[in-house]
Image: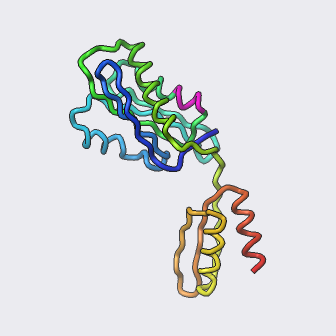
Amino acid sequence: MQTVQEAFVANYEVKRSKFITHLVPIEEFDGLQNRLKEQNPKANHVVYALRYFNEFDQIIENFSDDGEPKGGAGIPSLNVLRGEEMVNVAILTIRYFGGIKLGVGGMARAYASAVKEVLSQANILKYEKEFSYEFDSSYSDVQKREYILKKLNITKVEREFLANSVAWKIHADEKKLNKFKEEICKR
């Protein structure tokens, strides 16, 4: 399985139709289709496809043709994500109609090619399941904990400063969390 941690954009053109494809981590998907429609009012369609793991470790898939002929846009985009084993990502493709009809088959190939184009430019990472770990520390240990987190490249960190302590919640793969726990036990 593969994923991305940051957004990527690529352009693709076929028969004067322009396709602008956005590949984003699934956390960035909510509301993005509407924002892209607002930013591109002359675009004919903003098609999407997504795949992500739910809380039961099941892959959830969804897509929208956004007014394109049924099966001509969302499914081909989703099929590319499936073929590349992408998870926890969303693809949104903005289409500007170029005046030449592509037909359903041509359109399906164009959307699939647009998705392949953005994937070829993206920084694709191996998917590793994330876990969370919660702990408390004293105020005097905050810098030590931050140092260990930085050293282990754990970047998803939530902190809450309480009256007598600091409550932490960190998210990382199992290997990093185990190393973190070992480090804080040493000190």
Q: Main secondary structure of the magenta part?
A: helix
Is 125 in front, or is 30? 125
Front in this rendered view, residue 106 or 51: 106
**Left or right: residue 60 compared with residue 8:** right
Q: Quadrant of residue 155?
A: bottom right
Quarter of the image for residue 178 reads: bottom right
Q: Is residue 81 magenta?
A: yes
| Residue in the foreground of this view, choosing between 143 and 166 | 143
Figure check: 70 above or below 91: above
The magenta region covers 79-84
Whether residue 115 is visible to the viewer of this picture, yes or no, is yes
Of the pair 9 and 132, the residue shown nearer to us: 9
Residue 130: x %, y % from top left: 64, 54
Q: Is residue 37 left or right of residue 187?
A: left
Residue lying at the far left in this picture: please name it: 42
Q: Quadrant of the N terminus?
A: top right
Report x, y in % for residue 124: 56, 42
Does residue 27 lie above or below 142 as drawn? above
Residue 60 percent coordinates (x, y): 55, 37
Residue at 60% over, 80% down: 143
Q: How many marks?
A: 0
Q: Residue at x 33, y 33 (%)?
A: 94
